[in-house]
Amino acid sequence: MSTPLIQAVDWGFRYFDREKYALRHLNLEIEKKDKVLLLGPSGSGKSTFLHALAGLLSSNSLGTEEGRLLVNGDHPLNMQGNVGIVFQDPVTSLVMSRIGDEVAFGLENVGIPKDVIWSRVNAALAEVGLSYPLSQYTSALSGGEQQRLVIADLLAFMPGIWLLDEPTANLDPLGAKSVIETFFQLHEKTDTTVVLIEHRLTELIKLVNKVIVLVDGGESVLQGPPDEIFYKHGDFLKKSGIFLPDEIIERKRPVSFGKDLCLQASGVSAKHPGQSHLAVRDVSLEIKSQQVLAVMGANGSGKTTLALILASLLKPTQGRVEFIGVKNGESYFSWRAKELVQYVGMVFQEPEHQFLTSQVLKELLILPKRLKMKQEDAKQKADELLERFKLATLAHCNPFTLSGGEKRRLSVAAALMADPNVLILDEPTFGQDANTFYQLISFLEENVDAGQAVVVITHDIELTNILADRVVNLSQGSIVGESYSDLFSSKRSDLFLAENINRKFSQGLH
Amino acid sequence: MAPSGLFFLEGKLSRYNPAAKLLAALLIALGLLVSDDITSALVALTIELISLSVFAIPYKPVLRKTYPLFLAAVSVAIANIVASKAPALVIAGISLRLIAISLPGILLFSSTDPVDLADSLVQQCHVSPRYAYAALASFRLLPLLSEEFSLIMRARRSRGIDYGRGFIAKFPLFLTSVFALFVSAIRKATRLALAMDARAFNLKVARTSAREQAIQRRDIILILSALTMVLVANTAGIIAGTWHIVLLSI
């Protein structure tokens, strides 16, 4: 019998700044040419395992290692150059400023001769369909193109093992589609071993012939062919916060046509410093209470910029925004912050940017203090929100040490402390597991039914399907389509639904 | 054009070897620090200005981009006039010298692609690739910092905290925002370092280079020209009788 390509024997790893092991007593084997989907609830150590395989956890500097983890019979640290990894965010994965140099970087590191480097660079770029000159700046590429460039880095590197850590999570549907197609094309040509982490079970799982589920921090492991795992352990997976591939996410709320007009933007345009084109171009929009508005569009279409304008965090170069019935005559953009947050709350894509204190409870109490609210009232309200957002047991923890889902819930709770009439959320479901996804949706449903206006900036089609009443599609800063949610199916969709929506929009325009 | 938006000079000078340009600029800087007289400064500056046209560098954009240098020179002169009893000619000499020393440095960096500089430092000056390319990679992330800072400021406003009116009200919040920026910069750098190590950057094998930086004849000529210019300027100072070694006067 041949030895497995990847082998964990009672393996564990603990980061120095944590008391608990990220993974412990892990036993598993991955054979050569296996295509593995690695599943586990958030915080189950999936990424730690991938980093360890890539040789990125040198045990002396980051934490302590126990047991044995072998790649090709050797410690992963000695296997660098044979293992390639694709991270979520291409921006911090790219090293060099030009695409040719970028692909060449890894080859230089392993001592490939110059002539060979450039032929491999050209071949890899052609393989992922990037036909720009080698001197093209990486910063000028779209997110999907940047991630394909990262894949080209790997292709040129020719590792025997590919580790993919949610490679499409940061991309809009079209960018994700191009990356997924690239993987499928490569898959037909090569017989590398693949270990994949995905939160949403996209088309990518069709590549997989084996599923490994990490349970209890690695103490036990479920493994088998995908059908068997999803069939046998479906309930368990669902309970652990894992999306199932055939999961039907039903819409519960009927479509709402909204009640009162809260916020009105008329002809707003905005430009980013140092850029010549407009990020938002002549947009007019009405936001109504008891209604969820979804703003969709590709990366770079101006969604976030529009959200910042609506939240009075960025002053448009043209046009006006009016909060109906409040402070008539005073410009919306010169409101003092503590007044603003009582009318409009904004939750950023990265919750950490909005954290101000070192304790969850203080994070909620910081605003009532500025508003000179009575202390008992503030405390009571904070406790209610902590209870509702399942953060009560974490009240005295440092916000920065929470898990991704907990951070997201805290940032929403913090915005709700001021009871804003309008709540704007930028990519609220980004990187969230199924548990947080469903919790977030039921929180927002409750708020909207209670009369709040909710705006979600998103390219998550499932979120739009089950939550949004009205959808606005942005392209290059302009609104190119607007519709009520009943235009498209409320059944579970795949990534490619984006095109259907676009088609419906363009039909609607003619 | 580099995306960082920095002043970049295309053309003849950008094709010279970066290490050679660095050496030439250093020679000029050191050579002009020997004396503090007006003649040698004036001669050096004249030769520099003439050589601008030798390298086909247009005067106008250079003047427009280097105006802070001239402001600095003027303010040095004003400070000296106010504070010291030095004769006007000596003061003028100091100001001109400031320009003559800085100009080659500015031309060096504005005519050199950072990637070429890193390559050349590794290949010609035997700087460790670990430092050269790590610095280069972090240089690429620099423009992101200002975006990040405005993001942090907005995040604070969204939490009900603003700067109030007036500088004193703003200052403490400015400090905490800078700290937040620092934390997030470290987080970004850590992720980039991870990505570099994932591509075997810390592998202990002989690293090859995909881009070759060679020393050519024109680079030797550039260095010799710099040396000659320094000698000519100082000789002119000696002949004119104004030459005066700085180190001896201290």
Image (cartoon, coloured by chain):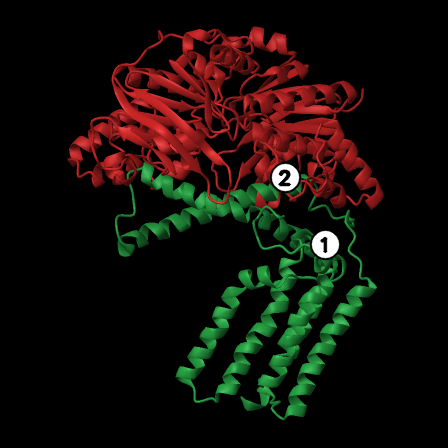
Residue shown at 60%/90% (left/top)? B244
Q: In this view, does A490 lie to the left or right of B57?
A: left
Report the number of discs: 2
Percent x, y for residue A12? 59, 32
| Image chain in green | B
The quadrant the N terminus of chain A occupies is: top right
- Give above or below for B219 relative to B98: above
Q: Distance between the residues labelled 1 and 2?
A: 19 Å
Q: Which of A162 and A170 is in front in this view?
A: A170
Classify mark 2: residues with Cα within 10 Å, few (<14), some (14-19) or many (20+): many
Q: Splitting the image into 4 quarters, where does residue A408 fall? A: top left
Q: Splitting the image into 4 quarters, where does residue B34 fall? A: bottom right
Residue occupied by mark 2: A138
Task: Name the subunit of mark 1.
Answer: B
Q: Is residue A394 left or right of residue B230?
A: left
Q: Which of A321 and A1 is in front in this view?
A: A321
Q: In this view, does A444 lie to the left or right of A40?
A: left
Q: Can residue A57 be seen in this view?
A: no
- Give above or below for B92 relative to A176: below
Task: Name the subunit of mark 2.
Answer: A
Residue occupied by mark 1: B119
Q: Are discs 1 and 2 located on one and the same chain?
A: no
Give the color of chain A as drawn.
Answer: red
Residue shown at 39%/38% (left/top)? A317
